[in-house]
Amino acid sequence: MVNLLVCALTNIFRVYLIRRFIKIFCFEKTVSKYKEIIGYSTFFIITTALYWTFQNVWLNLMVNISGMMILVSMYTKELRKIFFVSFASYIIHMGCDAIMVMIFVEYQPGRIFNQLYEVITDCMILVCVVLTESVVDRQNDEGVIINIPLLFIPLTSIIVLSFLIKDTGYTDYSIIIASMGILIMNFWVFYLYNLLKNNFFRRIENDRLKQKIQVYSKQIDFLLQGEEKINLLKHDMRHHITELNIMVEKNQTLELKKYLQKMTDFISSTQKETISSGNKETDCLLNYLLEKAKQKLKIVKTTVILPEGIKHSFDLNIIVGNLLENAIEAAEISKEKYLELFLKYEKGVLKLKICNSFSGNLKIGEKGLMTSKKNQENHGIGMSSVKKIVEKHKGILKYSVENDCFEVQTILYLQEDIN
């Protein structure tokens, strides 16, 4: 009875690990909690009952693999992914089972061994799942890799459990309670870590959305200001036309030019947009950041030459947004308060150069720019995103310091990204 209880508890933990492994590769689709509870509960009941009743290796293999395939199919209908995730998950479980048996158990076919050893197997599987998450997170550019020291928890648990369980009886309840406690501790540590990691990503996403809202809000202000002045001009147009006709009849050429110039200046004064390349998303971002730069800095120079058909505006905005925001912050605390932006697309090559004054605390190490900001974590995430996008487009990113001016240059090859 004790072995059955332990078997059920360890299998619950395995089902949790199976779900976690599936979500590594099938994160695109969100499945309702109700459907997940039914699916994983059914899988748990069937696998536990068949394992305990028949103790047949081949039956367990078929039931586990087919069950995993059904679980994966809840998240994706792609057959290749269903087969890959199901077999990969089962191979990890089977491999950890085999390692545990070879090291700790004198296994004999048909004989039920002490189920507390399954806790060790679960800890081994947890290590494999965590390592898989780390590799896949890096490939998917998620920005944060699992904190490797956390792996010492399941690894230490394996060592402790091996000493606790070895040569103990089946009915030693203190060993059972300790083993279950270790299993639950591993579950909660990694479950809470996942919650913290997800909250961290949500916070970053919220910050990005707030910035995006500010950008579009600023752009709307530009449009509304311009529209308001144009409406005023339309309203007074009859009077302007009358005045112009009088000047024409009197042949007052000089006065006519001055009057037209005043009208031009009136319209121009409404147009605060610095950049108008035709790429709405990029223009919005640049106008927002450059408007902020003009409020904080003494000298702001810009040269932006972009065609209207750049498709990868999202990637471009990440690079421009991060680098320009860093440059504005650095220039703001300097004496010169100087910023220069050069952005141009020509013959399949996008060139970006940002030059800004700085306070003298700047350091460039082997891994690139080393920040002096207090919030170094967010800076690292932003620069990491920039580097990954530059690598994605086979580009170049380099820093230099000349005449008390920090300069960052980026080259992206976007030959196929123009309509």
Image: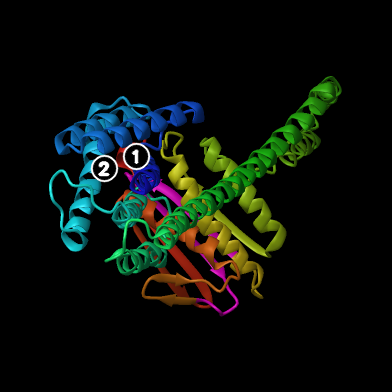
Mark 1 and mark 2 in contact (Cβ < 8 Å)? yes
Q: Is residue 284 left or right of residue 39?
A: right
In which quarter of the view is residue 186 placed? bottom left
- How far across and how far down the image is residue 104, in percent? 21, 62
Callout 2: few (<14), some (14-19), or many (20+) C-alpha neighbours within 10 Å? many
User: Could you tell me which quadrant the C terminus lies in?
Assistant: top left
| Part of the protein shown in magenta | 339-362
Q: Which residue is mark 1?
A: 22
**Looking at the image, is 145 positioned above or below residue 51?**
below
- How many discs mark residues in the rendered view? 2
- How far across and how far down the image is residue 337, in percent? 65, 69
- How far across and how far down the image is residue 40, in percent? 40, 33
Q: Which residue is mark 2?
A: 89
> Does the magenta-highlighted stretch encompass residue 342?
yes
Q: Residue 411 or 21: which is nearer the viewer?
A: 21
Residue type marked 2 = Ser
